[in-house]
Image (tube, grey):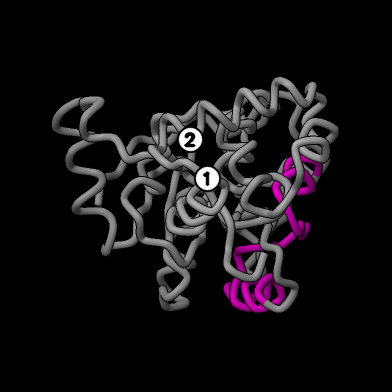
């Protein structure tokens, strides 16, 4: 596990934070993003028992999560990867453009090295597996709120060491690492069953541009049909089987 020094967390005009139950501990403000209501409620219950963590909002997809972050300015965004419309990886990547102090903690069922590397490149400060125990979740939220990097032990060894010790070569990249942000968006929407016309409308593109992206995806991912694209999207966690 690697730990990085915390960044400055406060701007001059930011409001004072709510104090915790003991009066002297500042509350960590959290937004939870997961497309399953029961999962969000479970995470909320675990976090709010800690005494120093306050859940200030919940979102069902990446776009809703970004809107809440911009409005509520939480310290931590706890976000799943496989969500409809805008997945967690792309949402985390867009946090930078919001110019907020919020730090992202990915909470996912997938331990795929490609996803973890992509999450870190997109700016996530933590990656925690959903099978983690409660204490680990609390540690992760607190660490990420300080600006430290927190990774589940199952992914820390194989993922963090190469990132720290040596630059990744192109040959070391997973298949989705070769895609642009737009191509990953199109891939997710294809895997969710949307037509070219629907994708074009959703992304404000022409159908011809969507078709071009589809062709690039097939070439880069070395598959010749939509079914192959869907299988890869599911395998690498861009969509869940029940999406």
Q: Is residue 160 magenta?
A: no
Q: Which residue is mark 2?
A: 218
Badge count: 2
Q: Nearer the viewer, residue 144 or 185?
A: 185
Relative placement, left or right, of 57 versus 159 is right
- The answer to whether 148 is drawn above or below residue 216 in the figure is below
Residue ID at (63%, 37%): 185
Where does the image place residue 67, in percent across and percent down from the top left? 80, 41
Q: Residues within 10 Å of mark 1 (few under 14, many from 20)?
A: few
Q: Nearer the viewer, mark 2 or mark 1?
A: 1
Residue 16 seen anywhere in this rendered image of the structure: no
| Residue 195 picture location, percent across and down | 76, 44
Image quadrant in which you'd find residue 4 = top left
Q: Residue at x 66, y 70 (%)?
A: 21
**Quarter of the figure with residue 165:** top left
Give the mark nearer the N terminus: 2 vs 1: 2
Q: Is residue 148 visible?
A: yes
* Range shown magenta: 39-67
Instruction: State the SS at label 2.
Output: helix
Q: Residue at horizontal 30%, vertical 44%?
A: 3
Q: CA distance from mark 2 to mark 1?
A: 7 Å
Q: Is residue 237 above or below residue 135?
A: above
Question: Residues at badges 2 and 1 in contact (C-beta under 8 Å)?
Answer: yes
As rendered, which of 222 and 150 lies closer to the eye? 222
**Left-right relation of 30 to 71:** left
**Helix, strand or loop at disc 1?**
loop
Q: Which mark is residue 18?
A: none
Give whichever of 208, 107 is nearer the camera.
208
Q: Alpha-carbon neighbours of circle 2 within 10 Å: few (<14), some, or many (≥20)? A: some
* Mark linked to residue 225: 1
Return the x and y of residue 128 as percentages of the image width and height. Answer: 43, 60
């Amino acid at each position: 596990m690697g730990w990085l020094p915390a960044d400055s967390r406060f701007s001059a005009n930011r409001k004072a934070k709510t104090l915790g139950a003991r009066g002297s501990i500042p509350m960590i403000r959290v937004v939870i993003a997961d497309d399953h209501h029961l999962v969000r409620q479970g995470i909320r219950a675990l976090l709010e028992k800690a005494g120093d963590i306050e859940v200030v909002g919940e979102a069902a997809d990446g776009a809703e999560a970004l809107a809440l972050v911009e409005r509520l300015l939480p310290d931590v965004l706890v976000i799943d990867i496989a969500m409809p419309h805008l997945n967690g990886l792309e949402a985390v990547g867009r946090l930078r453009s919001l110019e907020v102090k919020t730090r992202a903690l990915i909470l996912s069922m997938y331990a795929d090295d490609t996803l973890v590397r992509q999450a870190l490149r997109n700016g996530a400060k933590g990656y925690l597996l959903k099978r983690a125990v409660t204490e680990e979740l609390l540690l992760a939220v607190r660490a990420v709120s300080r600006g430290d990097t927190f990774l589940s032990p199952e992914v820390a060894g194989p993922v963090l060491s190469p990132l720290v010790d040596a630059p990744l070569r192109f040959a070391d990249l997973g298949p989705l690492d070769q895609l642009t942000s737009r191509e990953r968006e199109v891939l997710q929407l294809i895997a969710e069953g949307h037509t070219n016309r629907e994708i074009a409308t959703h992304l404000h593109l022409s159908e011809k541009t969507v078709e071009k992206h589809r062709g690039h995806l097939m070439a880069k991912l070395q598959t010749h049909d939509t079914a192959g694209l869907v299988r890869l999207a599911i395998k690498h966690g861009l969509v869940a089987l029940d999406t």
